[in-house]
């Protein structure tokens, strides 16, 4: 799968894992970031091709194996990002106390 770079000035933010999987299997790799309320956001380039793929998404015929592979990869990355974010918050709590214990 060819990686297509994301220009910094033009982006589309998607919070739908299935749509992101469809765009990923079409050749675009998103940048993942944490949004509000612990939701992962998928960042794609704002191009006419991406907009066309989004419009075609609802009725698209896809190769199921490619779609599931893209879904599993993105889900794994998404869960990894959430875990790293959670661990950072735990470290902040632990190191904020003088005895490195979470106060209850």
Image (cartoon, rainbow, N blue to C red):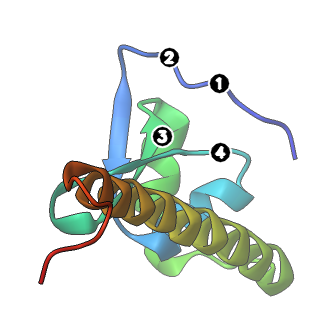
Q: CA distance from mark 4 to mark 3?
A: 7 Å
Q: Nearer the viewer, residue 48 or 75?
A: 75
Mark before the other along the chain sequence, 2 or 3: 2
Any part of residue 57 in sight: no
How many marks the image carries: the answer is 4
- Residue density around tag 1, few if under 14, some if 14–19, many if 20 or more, within 10 Å: few
Which quadrant: the C terminus?
A: bottom left
Q: Secondary structure at mark 2?
A: loop
Q: Is residue 35 left or right of residue 32?
A: left
Position of residue 87 measured from the top left corner of the image (x, y, whole percent): 43, 62
Q: Secondary structure at mark 1?
A: loop
* For the residues bearing labels 1 and 2, Cβ distance under 8 angstroms: yes
Q: Residues within 10 Å of mark 3 (few under 14, many from 20)?
A: many
Q: Residue at x 37, y 56 (%)?
A: 91
Spatial CA span between label 2 and label 4: 12 Å
Q: Label 3: which residue?
A: 44
Q: Residues within 10 Å of mark 4 (few under 14, many from 20)?
A: many
Q: Which mark is residue 7?
A: 2
**SS at badge 3:** strand
Of the numbered discs 2 and 4, the one sitting upstream in the chain is 2
Q: Write the residue at 85% across / 38% down.
A: 2
Q: Position of residue 74 (x, y in %)?
A: 62, 66
Query: Can the viewer see residue 35?
Result: yes
Residue 5 is marked as: 1
Marks 4 and 1, how far apart at CA: 8 Å
Q: In the rendering, which numbered label is found on residue 29? A: 4
Q: Position of residue 81 (x, y in %)?
A: 50, 59
Q: Residue furthest front?
A: 99
Q: Where on the picture, by quarter, is residue 60?
A: bottom right
Does label 3 or label 1 sit earlier along the sequence?
A: 1
């Amino acid at each position: 799968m060819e990686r297509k770079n994301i220009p910094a000035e033009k982006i589309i933010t998607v919070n739908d894992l299935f749509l992101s999987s469809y765009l990923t299997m079409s050749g675009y790799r998103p940048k993942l970031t944490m949004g509000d309320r612990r939701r992962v956001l998928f960042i794609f380039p704002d191009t006419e091709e991406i907009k066309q793929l989004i419009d075609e998404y609802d009725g698209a015929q896809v190769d199921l194996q490619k779609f599931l592979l893209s879904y599993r990869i993105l889900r794994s990355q998404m869960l990894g990002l959430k875990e790293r974010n959670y661990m950072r918050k735990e470290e902040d709590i632990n190191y904020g106390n003088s005895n490195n214990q979470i106060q209850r």
